[in-house]
Amino acid sequence: MVATSLISVTERLRFLVAFRPAIMSPSLAVRMAATFDQISNGRIILNVVTGGDTKELAKDGIFLDHDQRYELTDEFLTIWRSLMQGEEVTYSGRHLQVQGAKLQFPPIQKPYPTLYSIYGCYEVQ
């Protein structure tokens, strides 16, 4: 929300926005990221936060172990990438399921905004 408030008062600043795949659905994350990308004219970069302190994660209702969180993130990003590229997605995994998901308004950046994690860049565009 803070990053969004700065879009109209900046022109070149790129925004690194963090999100946790275990907290939100991939289709919601896609809509939010694509909307931000549109209104900022392609200035969003996304930080994928998979891990964290188990006590902090528990406060958000996340009780997955390390490997499960990374499995969920892999499923999340599979769905996320497909939606960002305009595909209609039906997916049934161990952690996530979507039926007929579709992004109505695509991002400016193609094929989608850059994704980062503490382990480095998922994609370099």
Image (cartoon, helix red, strand yellow):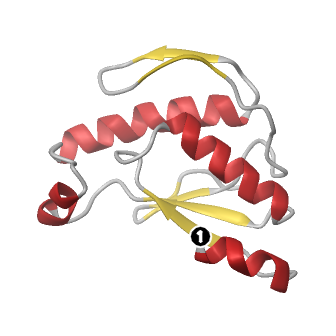
Residue 124 left/right relative to 8: left
Considering the numbered disc 1 on the image, is that residue within a helix, a strand or a loop? loop
Q: Quadrant of the C terminus?
A: bottom right
* Residue 19 place in picture, x, y as percent: 47, 58
> Which of the two residues, 34 or 109, is positioned nearer the viewer here?
34
Q: Residue at x 57, y 67 (%)?
A: 17
Name the amino acid, label 1.
Met
* Residue 33 place in picture, x, y as percent: 66, 52
> Does residue 122 sit above or below 7 in this rendering?
above
For mark 1, what is the residue? 1
Q: Residue at x 78, y 32 (%)?
A: 104
> Does residue 67 sit above or below 56 in this rendering?
above
* Residue 38 place in picture, x, y as percent: 83, 55
Q: Residue at x 34, y 53 (%)?
A: 50
Residue 53 left/right relative to 90: left
Q: Residue at x 28, y 57 (%)?
A: 51
> Which of the two residues, 111 or 98, is positioned nearer the viewer here?
98
Q: Quadrant of the N terminus?
A: bottom right
The answer to which image quadrant residue 67 occupies is: top left
> Does residue 28 sit above or below 6 in this rendering?
above
Q: How many marks?
A: 1
Residue farthest toward the bottom in the current orientation of the protein? 9
The answer to which image quadrant residue 79 occupies is: top right
- Crowding around mark 1 (Cα neighbors within 10 Å: few <14, some 14 to 19, many 20+) is few
